[in-house]
Image (cartoon, rainbow, N blue to C red):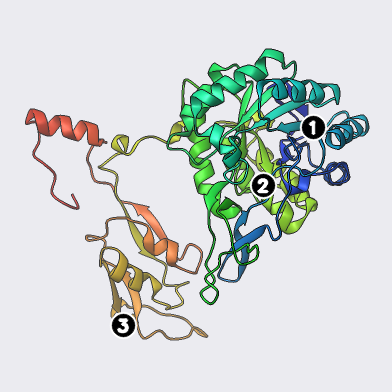
Amino acid sequence: MADLSVNFAGIRAPNPFWVASGPPSNTAYQTHRAFEAGWGGLIWKTIGTPIVNVSSRYSALDIGGQRMVGFNNIELISDRSPEVNFQEIAEVKKRWPNHAVIASLMCESREQWHEFIRRSEDAGADGIELNYGCPHGMCERGMGSAVGQQPLVAERITGWVMEVAKIPVIVKLTPNITDITAAARAAKRAGANAISLINTINSITNVNLDTFASEPSVRGMSSHGGYCGPAVKPIALNMVQSCAADPEVRMPISGIGGISNWRDAAEFMAFGAGTVQVCTAIMHHGFRIVDDMIEGLNSYLDEKKMCSVDDLCGRAVANVTTWEKLDLNFRQVARVNHDTCIGCNLCYIACEDGAHQCIDLLNPDSLGLDLGPGRVPHKHVPKVREDDCVGCNLCTLVCPVDRCITMVEVPTGKPPMTWVEYQAKVASGEMKPLPPHH
C-alpha cells in the first residue's frame, strides 16, 4: 500500500487530505471530529478582529436535480475572539500532535500581523495561512481579495509576516485576478514557503423572479459572495497548473476548489498540488467522505505502482501547453457503437445544431444492422460521415451511454506541425495556407 503521509513545506501530516479554512474548521470540536474521521490536516477558520455575520449566508446552484453543484456564501471570517481560537488550537495540538493544524490569519496592520503570528506559534500551530482571498465583506475593509488582487501589496504584507514567522507560511491566493501567477510570484519573492489556491470566486448565484431579490437574502437585499463547490473545479485546476508550470513560482502548492472525491484530489496532485483542501463537500456530506478519498487514492497509487503522493505530484503539468504548440496534423473522428446505441439521437441534434453537421440519421436496414432480440427497434440510427467529421468531441459529451461514441485517431500521413511552425512555413513560402478542415 502506498504511503500517503506528506511533508508539505516542512509541515508533516498523515495524509494530504486537509479541511480547508471555513465553516467546517471553526472550532476545536469540529477539528476533533475531522481528525477522528481521518483527515490529515486542517486550516482553522480565519482568525482576525472578530466580526458580526448576517443571516442568511448561503445560496446554491442546483443542476439537473443535483444539489449544490455550485455554492455561494457571504459569511465572513471567525466571529469568535482570537483568545478562544488560539486556546482551542493549543487544545487540538495537544490531543493530535501528529496532525497538521494551520492557523489562517487576516490582519489590518503590520503590528497585528506580528502579534497574531506569534500567538499562532505559541498555540502550537504547525503553519500559518495568509488569507488574501475573501471576495466579500473583508475586502471592503482593505483585506482579503483587496490584498490578493494587488501583488505588490501582497508581497509587502507577506514580507511583514516573514520578518517574525518561525513556522511555515502559506499564502492563499484569490482567483479574482487576471493572472494568478503574478500573485504567486509575489508570494515567492516575499519569502513565503508555499501557496494555496483557489479561494472563492466572486459571484451571484440567482435572482428570484417574483421578488427580484438574490439569495442569500438579508431582509430582501443581498450581496456578491464567494463561489465554490464542484462547479469551480475546472477554474481551480487551470490556476494550479499555471502556478506549477511557472518557473518563477516553483514552490509547494496546496490545491483547493471543488474537490469532492479521490479522483478530484488526484487530478490536483497530478497538476502539482502536494496537499488538497476540502470545504464545500464536507458541508454537503460530512467529514466521513475522507474514508473514500483515502481508500480511492491508495488504490489508484497502487494500481499505478506509485509509492507515495510525491510520485503523483506534478505528473501532468508538462502536458498542458499553449494552443499554438498543439499538433495541427493530428486527426480523430467519432464512431458510434450501434450495439449500445439507444436511439436517442442527441448526438445528431447536437452535431446538426451546435457543431459541424456530419452525422446522418439512417434506416438501420440500410446499414445492415441486426439490433438483436429484445432490442427496441430504432426508426433511425446515427452514422458519422468521417470525411466531414472534425473531431470536435461534442457527440461523445452529450451521449448518455458510456463509450457508445468514441473518438478514434485517423492517420494523416503528415508529420506533426504546430501553429508556430505553420506560420513560419507560410511566411517563408515553403507551403501555402491550409484550406479549412485540412
- Asked if disc 3 and disc 1 are in contact, CB closer than 8 Å, the reply is no
Rendered location of residue 377, percent (x, y)? 43, 86
Looking at the image, which residue is at 60% across and 36% down? 269
* Foreground residue among 417 and 228: 228
Mark 3, secondary structure of its residue: loop
Mark 2, secondary structure of its residue: helix
Q: Which residue is mark 3?
A: 363
Residue 23 as seen in the image, left or right of residue 247: right
Report crowding for label 2: few under 14, some 14 to 19, many 20 or more residues within 10 A (C-alpha). Answer: many
Mark 1, secondary structure of its residue: strand
Q: How many marks?
A: 3
Q: Is residue 434 above or below residue 158?
A: below
* Foreground residue among 385 and 220: 220
Looking at the image, which residue is at 47% across and 29% down? 181
Q: Within the image, what quadrant is residue 105 found in?
A: top right
Amino acid under label 1?
Val
Q: Which residue is mark 1?
A: 101
- Furthest-left residue in this view: 429
- Mark found first going from the N terminus, 2 or 3: 2
Q: Within the image, what quadrant is residue 85 found in?
A: top right
- Furthest-top residue in this view: 163
Q: Which residue is mark 2?
A: 262
- Is residue 3 something one can see in this rendering? no
Amino acid under label 3?
Asn
* Foreground residue among 43 and 145: 145
Q: Is residue 116 above or below residue 175?
A: above
Residue 45 as seen in the image, left or right of residue 110: right
Looking at the image, which residue is at 11% across and 34% down? 426
